[in-house]
Amino acid sequence: MVQIADYSCTYDNSVGIREAVTRKLELTFPDAYKNWKTMRDIALALKKEDKAEFCELPFCHTVEGEAMGGIINYGDAKSGPRAKTYICQTPEEILALPQIDFTKGRIREVLKACEALSKMGETVVFEISGPFTVLNVLADASITLKWMRKQPEEMKAILEKLKGELLRYMQEAARAGAAIISYADSTGGVNILGPKQMAAVTELFTYPLLKEADKILPENVLIQLCPKTSFALIGTDLAKWKEIKVSDGELSYGQACGKLVGRARFTGQTCIKNIEYCIDSTVQTLELTAND
């Protein structure tokens, strides 16, 4: 029997935008969320404020959905972009959406900000959202969960479409200099989908996505998984933990992830945003198991 442990995501530090940081920059909002130079400046300010080991981009989970046609409320200095109006009511409408064009719009600006930070010598953690988080920008969550139950073939096609888009996005992030790709799907956790559906999504989508990412991304890119995803892979026997020694003493999880770049492909024992979490010399990485 599949047993998938849940992970309570409670970390607020270094999450998105905070007015205490943005007001010091004297930026104009919401325009600051749309330009690579201001994204760069915000990322640097957040890193300094949090005393973090890395810069994070982007500052919300709406970039992919917007690039596929979603309508966004860009927010202000206090809160970042979020979904505004749902544009899809049926699976067919999702499947009819165009491919992401990485040469225009906010997604292009995010990639340019990543490239600029990388050229400055910064370690960039590039956040990419999972399918249910992307869908949450395009359609009401209650509808997509209904598709899972009542229109499984259509949902399978949607997941396949999104897998292709996210793999392309990962490649673009790597080209822009991202050292760590952080993958999370907070609205697609076991606490929302339930064990049976979570297992199905892990086998149908997550495992194939990560297997393909492992093939196409440069060796020096680390994929940091949300623990919700890690535990789902472990619970379905599609991955196993492997300890790697990264130091002779205690260090922060962020420092440990930096030392894993080029030595491992996957990690995810805790949230990358938990910057105060420390480990004692070894870090847990993940190895995908054979599923042929």
Image (cartoon, rainbow, N blue to C red):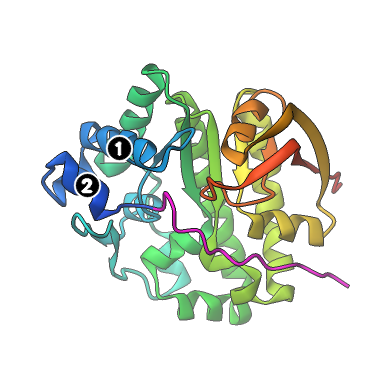
Vertical placement of residue 15 versus 126, above or below: below
Q: Determine if residue 102 is in view.
A: no
Q: Position of residue 143 (x, y in %)?
A: 47, 79
Mark 1: amino acid: Ala
Q: Foreground: 209 or 153?
A: 209
Identity of the residue drawn at 62% across and 80% down: 149
Q: Foreground: 15 or 80?
A: 15
Left or right relative to 280: residue 261: left
Q: What is the secondary structure assignment of the residue under circle 1?
A: helix
Mark 2: amino acid: Thr
Give the image quarter of residue 87: bottom left
- According to the picture, the residue beneath numbered tag 1 turns out to be 45
Q: Cβ–Cβ below 8 Å for labels 2 and 1? A: yes
Q: What is the secondary structure assignment of the residue under circle 2?
A: helix
**Magenta residues?**
1-15
Category of crowding for the residue at label 2, using alpha-carbon neighbours closer than 10 angstroms: few (below 14), some (14–19), many (at least 20): many
Left or right relative to 217: residue 165: left
Left or right relative to 29: residue 117: right
Give the image quarter of residue 244: top right
Identity of the residue drawn at 46% across and 37% down: 52
Q: Position of residue 269 (x, y in %)?
A: 69, 49
Q: Is residue 3 on the magenta stretch?
A: yes
Q: Is residue 210 on the magenta stretch?
A: no
Vertical placement of residue 51 versus 145, above or below: above
- According to the picture, the residue beneath numbered tag 2 turns out to be 22
